[in-house]
Amino acid sequence: MNIVNMKNLVNIIALVFMAVLLANCKNTNEIQGLQNTSGIKAEIFRIAQMHRDTFLMSTEKGRQIIASGFEDSVMVIDYGHVSIGSGSFLAHDLYPGSFDVPRDTKYRFFSNNTVLITFNCKLFYLVGKDTVFHTGRETDVFVKHNNQWKLSYLGFSPSQVSYFKVSQYPNGNHALYPDYVGIYQQSSKVADTIVMINGNLYAANTEDPRRYKLFSINDSTFMAEGFPERMIFGRGKNGRITHYTLESQDGQRVHYPKVR
């Protein structure tokens, strides 16, 4: 794991998991025989508040208190990287950052000694003069040893986010738009339909009939608001559109032929 990801990860541990516990304690998945979920939440709430207060101290004593809330070794999965670190190491690797209020918080109680918490979150912090954003779903597992709740596992799965805005690309060649209208086959049961309405292109899918407005990056490349993928239309030898290529954030490409 590179340094930036590790520091981001530790920031999430120190800040975001506390925020989620403080922000929303309503969603609970009860299991048979478990009676005291509210008491468990209250105790984790207390630990989270203590950690948040001590984090703001930025002192060695504060870091020791934070480390006491981690298991002796914490398993972390961050952007596909797996690592195991001591609570002391994680607490001493902190650096300032900020977060939005977590959303879609859910709790799963497996016993009186194990609880899983998952939520959507956004973390942002400064690297020099640049702001770095990380948006995704975090999953934490707390376990109770010797009558004390501690964090034993943290997983962070990034969301696919696009920061492109329609207003950034207003000058596409609209005269070419009719060429792109048609049906593009993904599989035997799934197809995309491209239509033109009031001079703008829209895409809909067999599995999601909602229409998404497309905006141009250049004369053959389009994106939909809020989606990171790019649609690149291709022409055959006769100049007609024969397919489009869906290019993902990591550079992978999938080709969908135009069938109508």
Image (cartoon, rainbow, N blue to C red):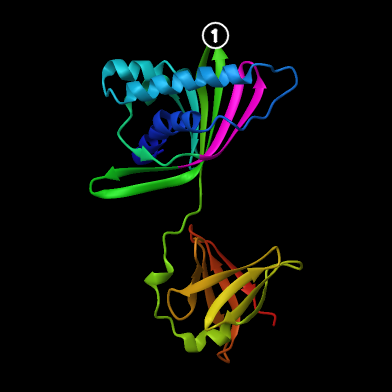
Indicate the position of residue 79 as horizontal and vertical percent values: 48, 43
- Vertical position of residue 129 compared to residue 87: above or below: below
Screen quadrant of the N terminus: top left
Indicate the position of residue 6 as horizontal and vertical percent values: 39, 35
Kindly tell me whether residue 80 is visible in this rendering.
Answer: no
Queried whether the magenta region covers residue 118, the answer comes back as: yes
Queried whether the magenta region covers residue 203, the answer comes back as: no
Screen quadrant of the C terminus: bottom right
- Vertical position of residue 210 compared to residue 197: above or below: above
Tell me where residue 206 sits by quadrant: bottom right
* 232 lies left or right of 260: left
Judged from this view, the residue extending furthest toward the left is 129
Indicate the position of residue 224 as horizontal and vertical percent values: 52, 67
Judged from this view, the residue extending furthest toward the top is 146
Callout 1 crowding tier (Cα within 10 Å): few <14, some 14–19, many ≥20: few
Q: Residue at x 58, y 92 (%)?
A: 238
* Magenta region, residue range: 103-121
Residue indicated by mark 1: 147
Indicate the position of residue 110 as horizontal and vertical percent values: 67, 23
* 61 lies left or right of 188: left
Tell me where residue 10 sits by quadrant: top left
Kindly tell me whether residue 27 is visible in this rendering.
Answer: yes
- Vertical position of residue 225 compared to residue 239: above or below: above
Judged from this view, the residue extending furthest toward the bottom is 238
Tell me where residue 213 sits by quadrant: bottom right
Kind of residue at disc 1: Asn
Magenta span: chief secondary structure: strand
